[in-house]
Image (cartoon, coloured by chain):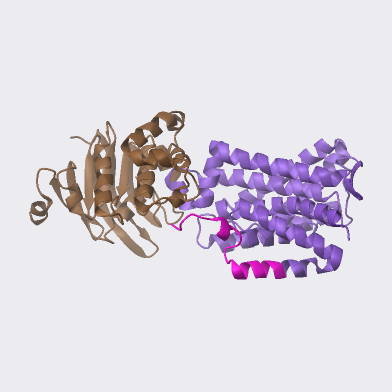
Chain colours: A purple, B brown
């Protein structure tokens, strides 16, 4: 058993799933939407990146940028369809759930209809070099995946901490009611949130495409993992999502090495259930030292 | 005083939640530079009146003019949908029970109150002004609000309201839930705020805290305004008049 190999896989998975979980977590806590169309945005951005690679250039930066932009576009469309018309109506949470589910079903079928059921693969973004650490090869896509996703999430977090728009989003995440009292426009902030989280899904799609193919339903498993990590981390907490992603990424890498890939979801859900039994608010419940208002 | 210098002019306002009607055809005028006390028991519509002015009730109808601009609208749903527009017209609502952002630091919290472009540009000097009023916050600027005591939170909540470029401050029960001494300190700070051309309405159950310190006191009962007393006249007399 190669510990370094397992660890490097765990870190890669942590980064990608962590990004998805942060996106889902931020969406839930700021606009109050459990975005079930996140998997569709993921697949949509993957196809966007594929199209850019065909039509524009196979350059890695172009493909990445196309993925992020298509993801952001997908997020904006979902916001316009599933948030703006219903966010101030009764039972918004349930209606939002159904609306995003509908978008997801219609969207993935449209992708299937448009691009056909055959999966596509993207060009190698980070080249095909590798670094040897001991006996283990760290391939370019592993290193690239980790660095790119950390850089993107760090940029988003920094922007949320330093800009005025970021302050609005964080305020909305903590207390949407008070946010409208201080004059924050929930609707325009919602577009920003959905564009950013959509961009995260888009980036994750391109990064994960270095391992898997792009297919109309390819976003489903990443979304399920993202949602479960977000729940495990405590919805609304970025730190919680990162820690949960690290735990579950490690679990996935260890399980696929020791038991085999088909057991990953089983051990993952056992782990999540165990964590939520002990800490019903997820990992954020341990981190949060604020008193409940 | 004429209607021209009215900061707030409410006419025929009714508001409530679902089938419940809390405010009944209410009229109210507040003039520039005025500090008004609004007293009444729990559940008689003080907070709902403030929420209706901010567009946060379940439904509402009637006219609300803020500095002459109509901000009231007939709504059957969508609480909070237009609140940011009312805030941009110059409303600062300081709600009951500290609607705070528990993870933001005190400083970020004050920044979040400086919403209009002008207030945002001037936020450094405005923060200084708020800190002059609430000196204890100066040491706490980098602490998340969720870790503060009740009195400190109330200061942050009121300070956030004072950061705004507001024409009208609506302060809901500033002393609620605080130790009497701290509650009095908070009220002293509110009385000390220089209003200029703006106006302030303070809802309060503890009449003794307001007596003789505001320009007039209005009673509220069952969703309607009852009686009015000037500061010189003790409230008790006015109520029985």
From the viewer's perspective, tell me whether residue A144 is left or right of residue B8: right
The residue at the point 58 percent across, 67 percent down is: A280
Percent of width and height locating residue B237? 8, 53
Compared with residue A273, is residue B105 higher up or lower down, i.e. above or below?
above
Q: Is residue B10 visible?
A: yes
Q: Quadrant of residue B21?
A: bottom left
Q: Does A47 appear in magenta?
A: no
Of residue B148 and residue B7, the one placed in the foreground of this image is: B148
Of residue A164 and residue B217, the one placed in the foreground of this image is: A164
The residue at the point 40 percent across, 34 percent down is: B127
Percent of width and height locating residue B131? 36, 36
Percent of width and height locating residue A113? 82, 55
From the viewer's perspective, tell me whether residue B108 is left or right of residue A220: left
Give the residues in magenta: A270-293
The residue at the point 34 percent across, 50 percent down is: B151
Compared with residue A87, is residue A192 higher up or lower down, i.e. above or below?
above
The residue at the point 74 percent across, 53 percent down is: A14
């Amino acid at each position: 058993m190669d510990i370094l190999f397992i660890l490097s896989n765990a870190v890669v998975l942590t980064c990608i799933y962590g990004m998805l979980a942060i996106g889902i977590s931020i969406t839930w806590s700021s606009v109050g939407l459990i975005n079930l169309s996140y998997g569709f945005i993921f697949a949509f951005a993957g196809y966007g990146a594929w199209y850019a690679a065909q039509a524009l250039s196979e350059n890695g930066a172009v493909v990445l940028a196309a993925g992020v932009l298509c993801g952001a576009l997908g997020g904006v469309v979902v916001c316009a369809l599933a948030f703006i018309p219903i966010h101030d109506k009764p039972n918004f949470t349930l209606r939002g759930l159904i609306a995003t589910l509908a978008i997801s079903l219609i969207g993935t079928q449209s992708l299937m209809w448009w691009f056909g059921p055959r999966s596509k693969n993207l060009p190698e973004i980070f080249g095909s070099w590798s670094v040897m650490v001991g006996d283990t090869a760290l391939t370019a896509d592993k290193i690239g995946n980790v660095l790119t996703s950390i850089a993107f999430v760090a940029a988003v977090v920094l922007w949320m901490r330093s800009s005025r728009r970021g302050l609005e989003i964080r305020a909305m995440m903590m207390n949407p009611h008070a946010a409208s009292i201080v004059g924050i426009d929930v609707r325009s902030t919602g577009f920003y949130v959905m564009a950013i989280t959509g961009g995260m899904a888009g980036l994750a799609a391109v990064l994960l495409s270095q391992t898997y193919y792009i297919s109309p339903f390819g976003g489903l498993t990443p979304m399920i993992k993202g949602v479960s990590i977000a729940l495990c981390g405590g919805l609304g907490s970025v730190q919680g999502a990162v820690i949960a992603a690290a735990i579950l990424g490690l679990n996935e890498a260890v399980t696929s090495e020791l038991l085999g890939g088909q057991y990953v979801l089983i051990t993952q859900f056992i782990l999540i259930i165990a964590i939520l039994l002990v800490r019903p608010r997820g990992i954020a419940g341990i981190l949060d030292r604020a008193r409940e208002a | 005083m004429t209607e021209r210098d009215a900061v707030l002019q409410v006419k025929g306002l009714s508001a409530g939640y679902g089938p419940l009607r809390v405010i009944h055809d209410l009229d109210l005028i507040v003039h520039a530079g005025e500090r008004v006390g609004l007293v009444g028991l729990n559940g008689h519509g003080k907070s709902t009146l403030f929420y209706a002015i901010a567009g946060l009730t379940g439904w509402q109808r009637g006219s609300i003019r803020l500095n002459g601009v109509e901000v009231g609208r007939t709504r059957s749903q969508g609480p909070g949908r237009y609140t940011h527009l009312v805030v941009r017209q110059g409303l600062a609502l300081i709600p009951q029970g500290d609607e705070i952002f528990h993870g933001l630091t005190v400083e970020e919290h004050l920044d979040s109150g400086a919403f209009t472009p002008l207030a945002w540009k001037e936020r450094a000097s405005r923060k200084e002004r708020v800190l002059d009023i609430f000196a204890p916050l100066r040491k706490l600027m980098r602490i998340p609000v969720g870790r503060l005591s009740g009195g400190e939170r109330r200061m942050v909540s009121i300070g956030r309201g004072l950061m705004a470029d507001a024409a009208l401050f609506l302060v809901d029960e500033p002393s609620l839930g605080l130790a009497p001494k701290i509650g009095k300190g908070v009220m002293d700070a509110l009385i000390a705020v220089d209003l200029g051309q703006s106006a302030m309405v303070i809802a309060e159950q503890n009449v003794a805290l307001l007596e003789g310190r505001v320009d007039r006191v209005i009673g509220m009962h069952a969703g309607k305004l009852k009686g009015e007393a000037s500061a010189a006249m003790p409230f008790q007399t006015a109520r029985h008049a």
